[in-house]
């Protein structure tokens, strides 16, 4: 059965009117974001009823997408869920987006995500671009090699040795300072870097011990050597100037530490200490 011509026209008119209205609504939201009465980041998150967090999808133990469930899992994921629980009353009110070491700050500053919980070291350089929470995890940079490798520590990274690192990481910067003679090859993410190590494109892979333990978990033919040679305190980053959000995150972190939830998450994912 076909509708009459007039009801068809009325339908089209109604549709156009509602499209126009929703377009106006979007415009309005955009405008208020730029005015003095705009909501601060925390108020906006509460109004949206969700917090969008940038996490790693390829970093075992911290943020790894489980291909069978499609869910991301790890220490950073559980910390993020607790943030949502504390700020929005429900740990499900978090949306995850994948970041890499290179994309996380641009994605935050573009407004794609509200916060970064992604193995990110608090550094003076980065403080120029983003604001950080209190430290929520302590890592340190180390080296991963194939068992039996002649590389036992930093002192073995000589001229001609190839060390693999990830773009946008503090590890890539630090290694050039600590082993200036060595050749550093940079990859987009940790999956690519580890694959390159396994296929013999490099002699060692360098990043935080915490991330390297995840690789050993995946392939026991590899091991950490030489201990740690930097301090990598992890912080949660938000766009600069969002004091209310940083305060809310710090208060959530404090609560997690006080009520034992932090220790529970730590125990679940971090086996080394
Ligand atoms: N924590 C270091 C950093 O923030 C290395 C881990 C990473 O690349 O995310 O750069």
Image: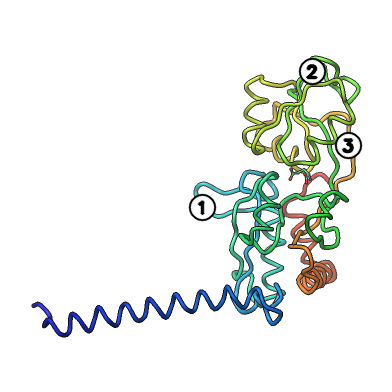
Residue under the point 83% across and 34% down? 142
Q: Are marks 3 and 2 in contact (CB under 8 Å)?
A: no
Q: Secondary structure at mark 3?
A: loop
Which quadrant: the N terminus?
bottom left
22 or 169, which lies in front? 22
Residue holding disc 1: 70
- Label located before the other in sequence (3 or 2): 2
Which of discs 2 and 1 lies nearer the camera? The answer is 2
Question: Where's residue 186, x and y in %?
Answer: 70, 31
Residue behind label 2 places its C-beta within 8 angstroms of ligand 1: no
Q: Are marks 2 and 1 in contact (CB under 8 Å)?
A: no
Residue holding disc 2: 161
Q: Secondary structure at mark 2?
A: loop
Residue under the point 77% across and 59% down? 236
Q: Secondary structure at mark 1?
A: loop
Crowding at mark 3 (Cα within 10 Å: few <14, some 14-19, many 20+): some
Question: Where's residue 77, x and y in %?
Answer: 67, 57
Q: Which residue appears farthest toward the left when viewing the image?
A: 1
Give the answer, above or below, for where 75 lies relative to 239: above
143 or 69, which lies in front? 143
Residue behind label 3 places its C-beta within 8 angstroms of ligand 1: no
Give the answer, above or below, for where 205 lies relative to 69: above
Instruction: Say how the picture is coloured.
Output: rainbow
- Label located before the other in sequence (3 or 1): 1
């Amino acid at each position: 059965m076909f509708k009459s011509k007039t009801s068809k026209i009325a339908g089209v008119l109604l549709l156009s009117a509602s499209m126009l209205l929703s377009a106006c609504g979007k415009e309005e939201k955009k405008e208020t974001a730029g005015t003095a009465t705009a909501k601060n980041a925390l108020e906006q998150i509460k109004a949206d009823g969700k917090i969008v967090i940038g996490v790693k999808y390829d970093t075992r133990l911290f943020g790894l997408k489980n291909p069978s469930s499609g869910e991301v899992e790890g220490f950073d994921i559980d910390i993020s869920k607790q943030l949502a629980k504390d700020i929005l009353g429900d740990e499900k009110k978090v949306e995850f987006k994948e970041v890499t070491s290179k994309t996380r700050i641009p994605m935050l500053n573009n407004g794609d995500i509200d916060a970064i919980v992604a193995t990110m070291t608090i550094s003076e350089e980065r403080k120029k671009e983003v604001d950080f929470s209190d430290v929520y995890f302590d890592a340190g940079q180390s080296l991963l090699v194939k068992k039996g490798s002649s590389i036992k520590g930093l002192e073995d990274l000589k001229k001609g040795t190839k060390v693999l690192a990830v773009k946008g990481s503090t590890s890539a910067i630090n290694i050039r300072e600590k082993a200036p003679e060595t050749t550093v090859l940079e990859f987009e993410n940790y999956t690519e870097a580890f694959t390159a190590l396994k296929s013999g494109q490099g002699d060692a892979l360098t990043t935080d011990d915490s991330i390297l333990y995840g690789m050993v978990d995946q392939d026991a033919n590899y091991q950490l050597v030489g201990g740690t040679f930097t301090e990598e305190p992890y912080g949660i980053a938000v766009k600069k100037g969002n004091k209310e959000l940083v305060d809310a995150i710090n208060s959530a972190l404090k609560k997690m530490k006080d009520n034992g939830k932090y220790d529970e998450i730590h125990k679940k994912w971090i086996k080394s200490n």
